[in-house]
Image (cartoon, helix red, strand yellow):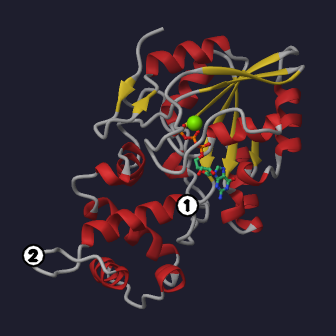
């Protein structure tokens, strides 16, 4: 198997060579998406690899506890219309695991079956394995690169019929820029956390203009003002100039997004297709 790759932020990721090799070994691939923003965490390249090898792909919308039920139901329909069996779960709360187990067994060509879990960093791949197993076996962590994140491929037995392979995250180069930045760098190691935080704040405000009022009691809807006010409230100032330390506020916003403390979700587009053109680029 070819070696892993490292993100510019120093996070160990799965290479496409490794993913291809794991897909070849698996019967089913769970493509885990963040239910709050499924399209930004969807990898067309992964689905093409799975389809090319004739394996079954199941979309798993995780963190569905952070999204209203009717919205996650809409997303489920959205992906099913595109031909993907789809399940929504909240792995951290062990919700939806019976359903997921059922879909795995129904999709399996033979039992016992080998299932690979793949997706962007921090969508909850390892948490899903723990939820299926019913106990904490696969290490997990809250932020990209924080201790416990997945660096190696590892096989877990979930029950007598299901073996699951945990994988490090993937970050397609053609993928969403905000996600590549906030999932490719540990927040504390970002040289410029302000740019991704501003992009993230803009995306969040577009869907939920009250997100920062609810999260921080900040009324402004200007991204830089939000960062300044947050820094002031938390007492984060440059020692020399006493100006608000907006970099620290930017890191806090990114962490609070990962933690689900800033409330946000996207509704599915009504017509857009995610399948795209097979010949388009990779
Ligand atoms: N709210 C919520 N948080 C979740 C859920 N599932 C996982 N998380 C949290 O999301 C974070 C990331 O979970 P992991 O299982 O480590 O994610 P991963 O995809 O394996 O991450 P990498 O190994 O770094 O690629 C952890 O803090 C989990 O507690 C969920 O269903 N709801
Ligand atoms: Mg993991």
Q: CA distance from mark 2 to mark 1?
A: 32 Å
Compare residues 178 and 5 and report the one nearer the observer.
5
Where residue 263 appears, as percent x and y from the top left, is 57, 72
Q: Nearer the viewer, residue 242 or 187?
A: 242
**Does label 1 point to a residue whose CB lies under 8 Å from ligand 1?**
yes
Circle 2 residues within 10 Å: few <14, some 14–19, many ≥20: few
**Spot occupied by residue 165 in the image (x, y as percentages of width and height):** 66, 23
User: On the rendered structure, is 272 left or right of 233?
Assistant: right
Q: Considering the numbered disc 1 on the image, is that residue within a helix, a strand or a loop?
A: helix
Relative image position of residue 145 (x, y in whole percent): 43, 41
The residue beneath circle 2 is: 240
Determine if residue 85 is in view.
no
Is the Cβ of the residue at disc 2 closer than 8 Å to that at disc 1?
Answer: no
Quarter occupied by the C terminus: top left
| Residue denoted by label 1 | 259
**Position in image of residue 175 (x %, y %):** 40, 43
Q: Nearer the viewer, residue 281 or 110?
A: 110
Judge left or right: residue 20 versus residue 58.
Answer: left
Q: Residue at x 56, y 69 (%)?
A: 261
The numbered disc on residue 144 is none
């Amino acid at each position: 198997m070819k070696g892993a790759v490292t993100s510019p932020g120093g996070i160990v990721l799965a290479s496409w060579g490794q993913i291809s090799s794991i897909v070849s070994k698996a019967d089913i691939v769970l493509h885990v998406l963040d239910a709050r923003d499924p399209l930004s965490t969807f990898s067309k390249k992964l689905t093409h690899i799975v389809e090319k090898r004739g394996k079954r792909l199941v979309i798993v919308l995780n963190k569905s506890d952070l999204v209203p039920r009717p919205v996650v139901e809409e997303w489920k329909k959205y992906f099913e219309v595109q031909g993907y069996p789809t399940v929504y779960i909240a792995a951290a709360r062990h919700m939806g695991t019976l359903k997921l187990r059922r879909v795995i067994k129904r999709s399996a060509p033979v039992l016992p079956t080998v299932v690979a879990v793949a997706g962007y960093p921090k969508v909850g791949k390892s948490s899903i394995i723990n939820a299926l197993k019913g106990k904490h076996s696969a290490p997990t962590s809250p932020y990209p690169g924080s201790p416990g994140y997945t660096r190696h491929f590892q096989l877990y037995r979930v029950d007598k019929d299901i073996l699951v392979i945990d994988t490090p995250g993937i970050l397609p180069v053609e993928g969403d820029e905000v996600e590549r930045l906030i999932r490719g760098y540990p927040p504390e190691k970002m040289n410029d956390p302000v740019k991704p935080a501003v992009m993230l704040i803009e995306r969040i405000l577009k869907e939920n203009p009250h997100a920062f009022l609810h999260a921080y009691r900040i009324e402004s809807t200007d991204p830089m003002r939000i960062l300044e006010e947050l820094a002031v409230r938390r007492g984060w100032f440059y020692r020399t100039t006493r100006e608000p330390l907006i970099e620290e506020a930017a890191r806090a916003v990114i962490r609070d997004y990962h933690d689900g403390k800033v409330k946000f979700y996207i509704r599915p587009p009504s017509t857009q297709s995610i399948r795209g053109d097979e010949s388009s680029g990779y």
